[in-house]
């Protein structure tokens, strides 16, 4: 279990602390998150840990399995009514493709943030522990794992399993 997430869970209901952590997601406000990151034992120059902490503060609903590809698959399943033609990519598929083509750093963080915000809008949990690891080791293997989780036929969503 990630020590970062363990600590974040302890402060999940501290609205002030979560508000300051969300500042880690905005370049001009990052300095507001630094004292909180320090209290959580995160170095202020650890961009990935700070980013994941900001995401958690934005959408603290956690999944214990899967990766961001799984989360995006659940988003796609909930938005399925938007598909107009099976030959065309849906908006979620297009966003997901752009996410997979992102370069590490600011570009990747911006695209991950948009997907987490979509997950929040659809009340879909995110596996932040796996996300932190995947962002640290952003490479072709990670991209393939996310793509397999998103496009593999036969993956059932939680709502399908409970029907």
Image (cartoon, rainbow, N blue to C red):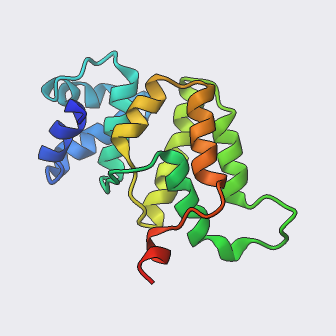
x, y percent for residue 37 = 22, 27
- 60 sits left or right of 136 in the view: left
State the residue at coordinates (39%, 38%).
Answer: 130
Give the camera-side residue of 26 and 102: 102
Furthest-front residue in view?
154
Would residue 11 be visible to someone looking at this image? no
The answer to which of 50 and 159 lies nearer the viewer is: 159
Left or right: 19 as drawn, with respect to 141: left
- Which residue is rendered at x = 25% and y = 25% of the image? 34
In the rendered image of this protein, does residue 18 appear above or below residue 42? below
Residue 109 in view, yes or no = yes
From this view, report whether residue 85 is shown above or below residue 133.
below
Residue at 36% x, 36% y: name it. 52
The quadrant of the image that shows the N terminus is: top left
Residue visible at 59% across and 29% down in the picture: 141
Tag count = 0
């Amino acid at each position: 279990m990630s020590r970062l997430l363990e600590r974040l869970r302890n402060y999940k209901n501290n609205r002030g602390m979560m508000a300051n952590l969300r500042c880690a997601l905005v370049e001009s406000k990052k300095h507001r998150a630094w004292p909180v990151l320090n209290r959580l034992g995160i170095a202020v120059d650890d961009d990935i840990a700070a980013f994941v902490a900001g995401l958690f503060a934005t959408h603290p609903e956690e999944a214990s399995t899967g990766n961001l590809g799984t989360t995006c698959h659940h988003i796609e399943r909930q938005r399925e009514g938007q598909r107009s033609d099976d030959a065309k990519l849906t908006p979620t598929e297009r966003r997901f493709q752009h996410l997979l083509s992102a370069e590490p750093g600011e570009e990747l963080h911006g695209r991950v943030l948009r997907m987490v915000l979509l997950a929040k809008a659809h009340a879909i949990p995110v596996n932040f522990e796996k996300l932190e690891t995947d962002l640290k080791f952003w490479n072709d293997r990670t991209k393939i794992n996310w793509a397999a989780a998103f496009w593999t036929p036969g993956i059932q969503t939680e709502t399908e399993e409970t029907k």
